[in-house]
Structures are given as structure tokens and as C-alpha cells.
Amino acid sequence: MKKKFYITTPIYYPNDIPHVGHAYTTIVGDVIARWHKLKGEDVFYLTGTDEHGKKIETAAKKKAKNPKEFVDELIPEFKNAWKKLNIDYNRFIRTTEKDHKKVVLEILQKVFEKGDIYLGEYEGLYCTGCEAYYTKRDLIDGCCPIHKTKAEKLKEESYFFKLSKYKNKLLKLYMDNSNFILPKFRAKEIINRLEDLQDLSISRTSFNWGIKLPFNKKHISYVWFDALLNYLTGIGYLKDDKKFSKFWPADLHIVAKDIMWFHVVIWPAMLMSAGIKLPKSVFVHGYWTFNKEKISKSRGKVISVDELISITGNVDSVRYFLLRETPFGQDGDFSEKALIERHNNELADKLGNLVSRVAGLIERFGVKKINNKLLKKLNLKKIEKLFDNYEFDKVLNEIFAFIDICNEYVQNKKLWETGDEKNLYELKESILKIAELLSPFIPESSEKIIKQFSAKKIKKSEILFKKI
Ligand code: MSP
């Protein structure tokens, strides 16, 4: 039987169009999904949108629309953006879908019957941008550390999830399974914060847009309790048992550091309470800035997916840049200059040059099969290991070091003079391997290269990466 791999992105708030930050997570997810497909695994890649809650309700009100109408208009923005970026997902889940509502109601009921939900009163400082309460200590001058807006004082009757009850189980989870939180250095911060773990308020009465609690219709489910469950709905929980039991537990949730807490504390505790197996890993990546400034509509610069692609006019450059520029897990800075430099110096001058030179030489001289010594210089084992360790920048480095070797080979052997068909055969096979390895990162260009170099008559073709 084929090995399975279930990978997810966060479901994004459709209160605005997606930007480079959302694109980054979704591209990384796609690269990992494509890599596992390349290994012959049965992959399910889930992404989507988080459509309930006060944040969406407020954004809709501002546009004088009802929330559903408002999000319906934004969903195509997400789907089109992912299409343009060549994201090959299996499902785009929306939390306003019927099957998801059913899942949320069932889990709420289950956790309630287990005795893990009780009625209490909540008074706290709330940030609508985060859809989360803060303690005074977390705020900076009374303002949210992320959105810099004043936190509102809210007091409401609320149901609570007995999160604190799971403290020791959570600690044990991190101890027993050192891959649960990746990169590993992130775990320490969580373990510290677990010290004074409080129960979690999971219902609201101050607004309407959301799923009503099955045991008290006056209360709306907290948007995070609803949203996290998308990972179950997405692969058919309560709907398609075969699919669900095949793909659950998730192999990898990808999130950024802003929502780590929800995924490594609240989410596993919810699953423990509901008696459902836990995901295997949550990978927490860093945050991108744009020209060293925060990416935010209110406080800085936002770069849309269309703008992103238009800088080089090439989607693959964007995908390549985002994975090459910063180690996965660290913060990064996006700038047009850095993108153009990598496009020119690496994609055009190294990869593009190799492909076009060798194609031209093969067109002139042809190839003759021999034992390939050149290809042996490619360290496949190392690349696989780096990939499985999520060190994508190093994977690309390794592949590009081999591209350098191939370019030098053409140069040193003076192939334009010798026309050595055996050497050209070595290069042809090497280029095919390079294209295969690069296909998760730059699928469109890789496909072109593979098509060109597996043809009966190899010919020079149009330039892959036009220099800027
Ligand atoms: N709706 C919640 C997630 C629910 S998941 C069950 C949410 N949505 S969001 O629209 O705010 O998206 C947050 C995610 O978008 C981050 O975790 C990250 O994946 C991505 N990013 C948003 N801005 C980003 C950067 N500036 N840099 C890197 N990733 C960023 O939170």
C-alpha cells in the first residue's frame, strides 16, 4: 500500500485579499506536497478560509454587506491567487460549508458530554484583529502586540473549555514526541507559557456571525474552536470514513509563529478531549517583512500576489525566491531587489544558461549513451535528508551547486568545439534529474525542461528566465 501524507496550511481570514505572507505558507505547503508526490506517496493537501467570527463580521459591516455575501466575494481572490501560483491543493475548505458545521457541532457536543465544557463569566481585554483575549502583561501600553490597536474590555457570559486540565498531557506530548513542535527550539517558549495555563473561553454572546453551540443557542462558538476543526472536516470526518481513516492523523500542519499557540496547545487538547488521534507535527515558520517593514494594511505595506508575480513576470521566480532566501523557520525580508537578483543570477544565469546551452549543443551534435559519471556528483541522499528536515534553502543550494558543476563541465570540456556526444548525454540526463528535483519548487519551468529534454529530437527553445 502507498504511504499517505496529509498536509495543511492555516485557513486564512478572508477579510482582505491574500498577500505575500499567506502566499508563502501556501507555496511551502505546495512544495512539500509535491515532494511527497514525487516520492510516490498518496498526498492530501488542504487549504482554505476561516470565515466566521467578529473580525469578519466587522469587516463586512464596514462594507455594508452581510458576512456571507462579503466572504463570498473574497473567496475567488484566494482561489485565483493560488491558481496563479500553481498551488495544487486537494481541497479548498470554507468554514461556512455544511459538512464543517456538522463537525463543529459534533465535537462541541462530545467535549461537553465529556464534562470538559462549563459555563462561566469572562472579563478580559480583547483584540478583534487576533480574535483573542490578552492578559495585561501581554499588551504593550494596553495595545495588542501584533496589531498595535487598543484592546477592548469585554465582559460576557461564556462557556469554557477545560484547557488547564490537559497541561500535563501536553507536556508529556512534547517530551515523548520531539517532532510535534518543529523547529525544536520553539517548544521551549510554549513550555514556559504552559506554566499558568488557563481554561479557554470558547463562546461569545456579543455578536452573531458563527456556529451556535448545540447545548445553548444563545452562544456562538469561538472562532478558533470552529476553525481548528477544519483539519478534520477537510478529509471527510463524519462524511467519508474511508478517506478520514486513511489520512488522519495529519502528518504536518504548517503555520507561522503568530498562531503557534493555537496549534500546539489548544488544538491537541481539543483532540485529546474528543478522543481523536493527534497530528504528527506542527511546523512553525517565521514572519516576512517587506523592505524591512511589517506587512500590514493599516501599518505598512501589503504586496498582493499579482504584484508579486509582476516583479519578474515569472511565478517560478517567486516560488524559488521565497524558499531560497530564508531558512524555513526563520524570519525573512522580501524586497523586489533581492527577488530580481536571484532571478537574474541564479535562475537565468545558472539554470537557464545551462539548459539553453546544452539544448543548443545537443541539437547540433546529438547524444550517445554511456555510463554517467557526471550525475554521480549529485548527492541525492543529502538532498533527500535536507528535504525531509525542511531545509529548503539548503536543498536548493545543493541542486544549484550541481548546476554549477554542469556549467563548468560544458566549459572545461569545450563541448562547443569537441561536440562530444557522450558528454552531452551525461549533461542531458543530469539536466533531467535537476528538473525533477526542482519540480516541487518551480513546477512550470521544470515541466518545460523535462518536456524539452525527453523529446526524441532535442532542440533549443525559448528562454526560460528572461533577465531583468
Ligand atoms: N484564520 C487564522 C488561522 C486559522 S487555522 C485553523 C489566521 N488567519 S490569517 O489570515 O491571519 O493567517 C495567518 C497565517 O498567514 C500565518 O500563520 C502565516 O501562515 C500566514 N502569514 C500571514 N502573514 C505573514 C507574514 N508576514 N509572514 C509569514 N507568514 C504570514 O490566523
Image (spheres, helix red, strand yellow):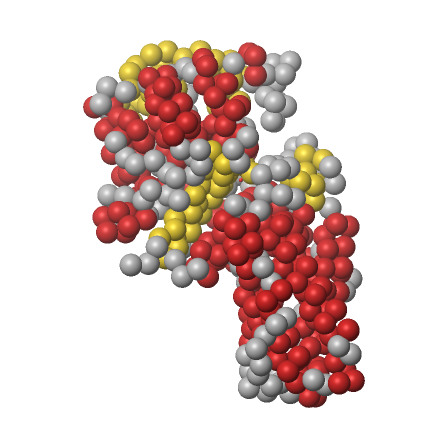
134 is higher (above) or lower (below) than 459: above
Q: Quadrant of residue 436?
A: bottom right
At which x and y percent is residue 254?
A: 48, 41
118 or 320, nearer to the observer: 320
1 is higher (above) or lower (below) than 464: above
Placement of the N terminus among the 4 image quadrants: bottom left
At x 37%, y 11%, the residue is: 121
Residue 209 visible from this viewpoint: no
Residue, far left: 113
238 or 170, nearer to the observer: 170
Q: Quadrant of residue 349?
A: bottom right
At which x and y percent is residue 265?
A: 42, 26
At x 47%, y 33%, the residue is: 181
106 is higher (above) or lower (below) than 391: above
At which x and y percent is residue 277?
A: 30, 36
Placement of the C terminus among the 4 image quadrants: bottom right
At x 35%, y 53%, the residue is: 4
402 or 332, nearer to the observer: 402
38 or 203, nearer to the observer: 38
At x 45%, y 18%, the residue is: 194
Q: Quadrant of residue 176?
A: top left
